[in-house]
Image (cartoon, grey):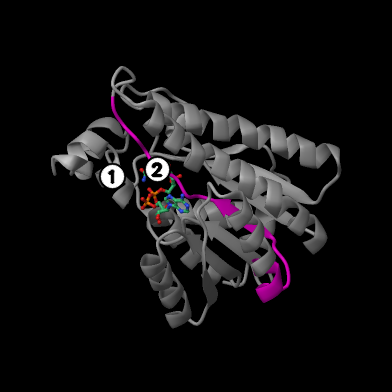
Amino acid sequence: MGRLTNRVALVSGGASGIGKASAVRLAEEGAKVVVADIDAELGQQTVGAIQDNSGTATFMHLDVTNESQWQECVAATVDVYGGLNILVNNAGIAVGGSILTMTLGDWQRQQAINLDGVFLGVKYAIPAMIESGNGSVINISSVAGIKGSANLAAYNATKGGVRLFTKGVARECAANRWPVRVNSVHPGVIETPIWDKMNPELLEAGMNTMDLESMAEQVVPTGQLGKPLDIANGVVFLASDESSYMTGTELIIDGGLCA
Ligand SMILES: NC(=O)c1ccc[n+]([C@@H]2O[C@H](COP(=O)([O-])OP(=O)(O)OC[C@H]3O[C@@H](n4cnc5c(N)ncnc54)[C@H](O)[C@@H]3O)[C@@H](O)[C@H]2O)c1
């Protein structure tokens, strides 16, 4: 408790899954948290969970593909809480399916959320972090940003992009002596709603539910399905001063999947 007292955090995609768990854990450690998402109803539930736990949080509408909304969200965060120290670029979607049948529209939608969204977050958060005196950017990539997977090539492209973009931005911050660290987190198979939204064709046919426990048993070396909290604990570590000498690196949390 108290590892992030007096810090202000913005979590994109904070309404669900890994973003929700990260927002809750950051608040538990004392950060004031902006939960930013397109889903106001679930976003308010995250805020409610934080407040019920005596934490400080507020919801802001943010579509991460929208440049002016990013500008407004960062400015409003600084207005409400007096600065910005932690950005979790978490909002993301996974569009599965063969590259032969994937539409250009699906490719571009996924690029826009997973990669443009991260670019815009970094672009507008870093000046506010410099102004605030310190910052930690945590970009949520994936094991799919390290290894390829059949029927996930387009997702691989976005997450591989996030991984290397992170390193480039980290070096730019370091070269300029800006007080901002930038790292990526690479979750393995984590139990969140993302899996049920993955394949648009199956979704339309109402057949998209995956048995994640069995899949994890088969593909994860430890046999375990990860929980959002497993990732949130890594996010808190990268947000805190305990990781103060870490920048441009990648934290893999995957039950051994990449080993
Ligand atoms: N769950 C996993 O196994 C897993 C593994 C590796 C990486 N990830 C990554 O973790 C991140 C979080 O995923 P999750 O599993 O918690 O999924 P999730 O579907 O539970 O949550 C994603 C959140 O992002 C929000 N979102 C979607 N589009 C948005 C937009 N345009 N603007 C703002 N918010 C938007 C959704 O409303 C939702 O609240 C994603 O970047 C995902 O790629 C997840």
Instruction: Please say whether residue 95 is one of the residues in the magenta stretch.
Output: yes
Residue 169 image offset from top left, x and y in percent: 71, 37
Mark 1, other Cα within 10 Å: few <14 / some 14–19 / many ≥20 = some
* Residue under label 2: 93
Quadrant position of residue 33? bottom right
Which residue is most to the right?
176
Amino acid type, callout 2: Ile
In the structure shown, which secondary structural element does the residue marked by tag 1 occupy?
helix
Distance CA(mark 1)–CA(mark 2): 8 Å
Residue at the spot 43% in from the left edge and 81% down from the top edge: 52
Most foreground residue, 220 or 95 = 95
Q: Label 1 sits on what residue type?
A: Lys
* Tag of residue 163: none
Graded by Cα atoms within 10 Å as few (under 14), some (14 to 19) or many (20 or more), the crowding at tag 2 reads: some
- Whether 52 is drawn above or below 128: the answer is below
Residue occupying the point 13% across, 44% down: 206
Q: Residue at x 45, y 32 (%)?
A: 108
Q: Is residue 10 left or right of residue 227?
A: right
Residue 236, can we see it? yes
Q: Which residues are magenta?
A: 77-97
Q: Position of residue 231 (x, y in %)?
A: 45, 51
Residue 82 shown in magenta: yes
Q: CB of residue at label 1: within 8 Å of ligand 1?
A: yes
Name the residue tied to disc 1: 197
Front residue (pair 183, 42):
42
What residue appears at the point 41 percent right and 67 percent down from the top-left corner?
40
Local secondary structure at mark 2: loop
Cβ of mark 2 under 8 Å from ligand 1: the answer is yes
The answer to whether the residue labelled 1 contacts the one labelled 2, judged by CB atoms less than 8 Å apart, is yes
Visible in this render: residue 259?
A: no
